[in-house]
Image (cartoon, rainbow, N blue to C red):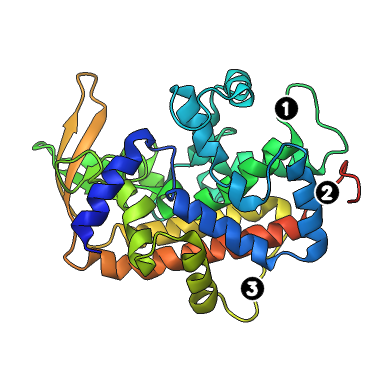
Amino acid sequence: MNFLSILLGFAILTCWCDEAAAWARKGHEVVAQIAESLLTPATQSKIRKLLSEAGDTNLVSVSCWADELVWAARDEGPLRDNKEAREFNTNFPNNRRWHFVNLPLGTMSYEEVSKFTSPHDIVHTISRCIRILEAPTVEPGEFSKVEALRLLVHFVADLHQPLHCGTGYYSFDQAGTAELISFPAEAFGKATDRGGNLLFYGALPTEQLHALWDDVIVENIDNSADYQVLADFLTGHYLPAELTKTPGDYHRWAEIWAADAVRIAALAYLGISLGKAEFDPDGNLTRIEIKLPANYLKANVAYAAEQLATAGARLAQLLENINWRGLAEP
């Protein structure tokens, strides 16, 4: 399968997608499948019992629910007529913002860039999901435990898509040429490319950096449309025999994982040539023309593969650590 055929297929698949989506469906299913394969039988049993209460079967089956909520809000996708989705979007109209955090390249820790974070960002939302799952009962006005699990599965995967955590911030010369800012202290208040969504290497709407990482690079890992095939490949080639555990309190692991993702994002920007920027009448950045290095896909496939495998392993470790309070023994 060549690059052009993948891209044309992706143009069709992304008719629902925007900056809220991360990894395509295959990527999310892969992360969920790897995680499920690493869970102990006891944790698997608890999770499947919780999911079965809502008619779900396993982690793979709920791995894209958070994206489908975004599509449903636009009256699109498989949940467009779903009562639960309508109610969720009514009660939590800003859930689209939960999928990302725009941290500047050069970020070393989540704490040091607190002014770039938000209570509605992906790190805070992961913490919220854990809190709901561990609570004896769900507080009024919160989403349910099964919804928290669906979101958690999705957002841990999103967190490992580098461009959902790291983003370019820019200054511009008089000709409108963009200059990437390397230091977080200089980035605050500057224009951002929204995780590569405004970096275009071609004329098509899908020919932008974020979409390239969501789908095209993933397809180039194994050239298979089957998520199980990719999950098996990643398990065999990118997971060590003994998995490293994130240090510290698991309630704050997402902060560490976000900083890790930004470091990969910085590598994703290497070698990209920046061209002229475009702005709307209010002066907001709308587009930056870029040129990718000739070997860009080959150079970044391994990073994407490692991030997907790592996301699956970390999701499993997080699910193993959660105190499943308020959930009766199966």
How many other residues sit within 10 Å of disc 3, few (<14), some (14-19) or many (≥20)? few
Secondary element at image label 2: loop
Above or below, 138 against 297 in this view is: above
Identify the residue under disc 2: 324
**Dot 3 or dot 1, earlier in sequence:** 1
Distance from the alpha carbon under mark 1 to that under mark 2: 17 Å
Q: Amino acid at mark 3?
A: Thr
Of residues 142 and 147, the one drawn nearer to the viewer in this rendering:
147
Is residue 62 shown left or right of residue 172?
Answer: right
Question: Residue 142 bears which disc, if any?
Answer: 1
Q: Position of residue 248 (x, y in %)?
A: 71, 61
* Residue lying at the far bottom of the rendered structure: 241
Viewed as shown, does residue 325 lie left or right of 275?
right
Please report whichever mark, 3 or 2, sits nearer to the chain's N-terminal start: 3
Give the percent coordinates (x, y) of residue 13.
Answer: 34, 42
User: Which residue position is annotated with label 3?
Assistant: 244
Q: CA distance from mark 3 to mark 2?
A: 23 Å
| Inter-mark Cα distance, 3 to 1 | 33 Å
Q: CB atoms at circles 3 and 1 under 8 Å apart?
A: no
Give the residue furthest to the left.
Answer: 175
- Of the two numbered discs 1 and 2 on the same chain, state the one appearing first in sequence: 1
Residue 328: give its label: none
